[in-house]
Image (spheres, grey):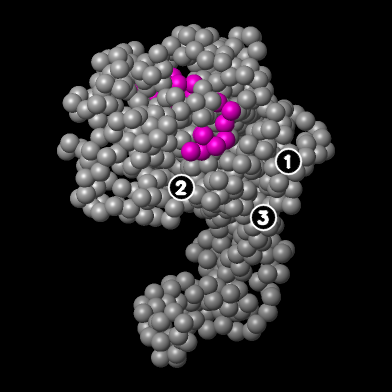
Amino acid sequence: MINQKISWKQTLHALLYLAPMMILLSIFFLYPIISTFILSVFKKYNFYTNAGQGIGFDNFAYLWHDPMFHQAVKNTFIFVLGVVPASIIISLGIALLLNRFSKVRGFFQTLYFLPYVTSTVAIAMVWTWIYHSDYGVLNFILKLFHLPPVGWLTDPHYTMLTLIIFSIWKNLGLNIILFLVALNSVPKQYYLSASIDGATPWQQFTNITVPLISPTTFLLTINAMIASFKVFDQIYVFYHNTAGPNNSGMTIVYYLYQKFYVENNYTVASAAGVVLFVIILLATILQNYVSKHYVHY
Amino acid sequence: MQVRFSHISLAFTPDKDTLHDLNFTINDGELVCLLGPSGGGKSTTLNLISGLLVPTKGNILFDNQDVTKMGPSERKIGMVFQNYSLYPHLTVENNIAFPLKIAHWKKADRLARAAKLAKLVHVEDQLQKNVNELSGGQQQRVAIARALAKDPNILLLDEPLSNLDARLRMEMREEIRRIQQETKITTVFVTHDQSEAMHISDSVMVLHNAQIQQYSKPNELYDHPANQFVASFIGDNPLNTFDRSLLDDTELKEELGKVYDKATTVGVRAENIVLTKGEDTYQHGVRCKLLRSHRYGLISTRLYSFKGIELDATGLTEIHDTNEEVEIYFQKRGFFLFDASGNNLFLE
């Protein structure tokens, strides 16, 4: 069997088995993606008849000149840079701590994992209370340190910081669990032999732990980055269906949403989607390239 | 560097000593094997030398300096683990240089040192490879080179050959011997394989039941085992043992003389059973019957029945029929009498 040539009949047979999945994928993934691309280059489009007129890059030109879109791109990048490195570093730190104290590990693991399994909308509601400028816990803590209260949800200067803090916290659970798995999969013998050579805990961390968990770090970074580029629901909930005070929390996906559902400008929304697609694609390619030098499988 | 254990005891639980009152000296430049069955305390002893374990009682001295309380890096030891423990993310070169990197050597210096060590262990053409690309034997060589990188006082090897196949094991044990003799480093080698220990070492320490059973030159262990445990543990064939009373009505009893009365158990090596008496045998034999025999290459094994017990005999060449009654003789060098606590009575 192994050395036989594959016949057409066999190929057809195989395709038949693949068909159910292929059909589902085509309808729910492939078709919408292609539609978005087509929609983004129509000059005019009628939503009800699904008929487009004229092909061109007018929508992209519109985005190029729209200050709101510039704001959205800028905010999205601030968000990604604010959330991804911080959440990776903080969750690795917590995972290292939990790994040391195995007795309380299960308890804290559950605690940190809770936000991950709860709906973003529900926990964002809780956080609107934490962030409240008059009665919020956060401002109460600031007051203990004699710091002036901050209008977390009302001051446009703090909008991105508010979103970043919340998102870091929300991402911790999954990251910690996956880091714990990775930390446990590093054979203890490496630490033993390094300690015989006189390696300090910090040297063991940088020379053994970091390189040996790098596949997990890489996976989590890509994952967090893609999720952060698509940030939307926490803004929607925090600012009650707006993009924050003075649109200070405008991100690419929020812009897309605004154009599509509020302004019914479908072609521009699609173009924004295509731009986001290209940005994420480029960022992923860049990370893949960098990982070749730093990730050890 | 000389290593001395003075009244070392180690207990993991309060009621049972894993090692009990160990006293020994390993001389500078020697290769010593710690030999014994699993759970005998050999790895524990190795870890005490390394400083990974701290004794409950007693002192450890390196060249008369008390190192009992020192950690592994202070004692300056090099260690090779059973599964080599090479860092998978580093090249061969960087693995060997790793201890030097930890010690903040300059990059050029440590790579030069790594190249020199690679040459010593014969992996100089593999330096840029990833360790996963190497064979088991090559990984072993790299592990030894890494252990030697910091020019340690003592090289410790924990069952270094047990992950290799039989042929490679023979090759590597010769290699370890060669490297040890070239560097003249004091080496302690843990193994449960008696033939490995016999072939490679200057001295062998047999550990069993938390104690040293015997610590001597390899041939001494075979020729003059201290007790029944050592006699049966050393040697390629199992030791035949039977109750002394079986010899009570034989003339052999008379020939053995006074020492016979103290004995409870008789031990005789399979290779020291012969069919003709000679200068090196006792003059009186015992009658027994051949049950069966088979031959594999040079070695023929026969099973004799003697008063209801079975005796293995190897190295016999004369042919005779199954079930035929013959007189067998015991060569003196492979015949032992043990007292109730297992001590070899001929040593007294």
How would you rate the neighbour count of disc 2 (Cα within 10 Å): few for under 14, some for 14-19, many for 20 or more? many
Q: Is residue B340 above or below residue B171?
A: above
Residue at point 72% right, 34% down?
Answer: B182
The image position of residue B240, as x and y in percent, is: 30, 35
Q: Which of the 4 quarters of the picture holds residue B313?
A: top left
Q: Nearer the viewer, mark 2 or mark 1?
A: 1
Real-space CA distance between mark 2 and mark 3, rounded to the nearest whole angstrom: 39 Å
Q: Respond whether the residues carrying marks 2 and 1 are from the same subunit.
A: no
Residue at point 37% right, 46% down?
Answer: B316
Q: Respond whether the residues carrying marks 1 and 3 are from the same subunit.
A: no
Residue bearing the label numbered 2 = A237
Circle 3: residue type: Lys
In the structure shown, which secondary structural element does the residue marked by tag 2 occupy?
helix
The image position of residue B143, as x and y in percent, is: 62, 39
Real-space CA distance between mark 1 and mark 3, rounded to the nearest whole angstrom: 33 Å
Residue at point 64% right, 9% down?
Answer: B65
Residue A292 numbered tag: 3
Chain that bears disc 3? A
Q: Which residues are magenta?
A: B195-215
- Which residue is more in the foreground, A196 or A114? A196
The image position of residue B70, as x and y in percent, is: 59, 14
Q: Is label 2 in contact with label 1 (beta carbons under 8 Å)? A: no
Image quarter where the N terminus of chain A lies is: bottom left
In the structure shown, which secondary structural element does the residue marked by tag 1 occupy?
helix
Residue at point 24% right, 26% down?
Answer: B251
Residue bearing the label numbered 1 = B120
Residue B215 numbered tag: none
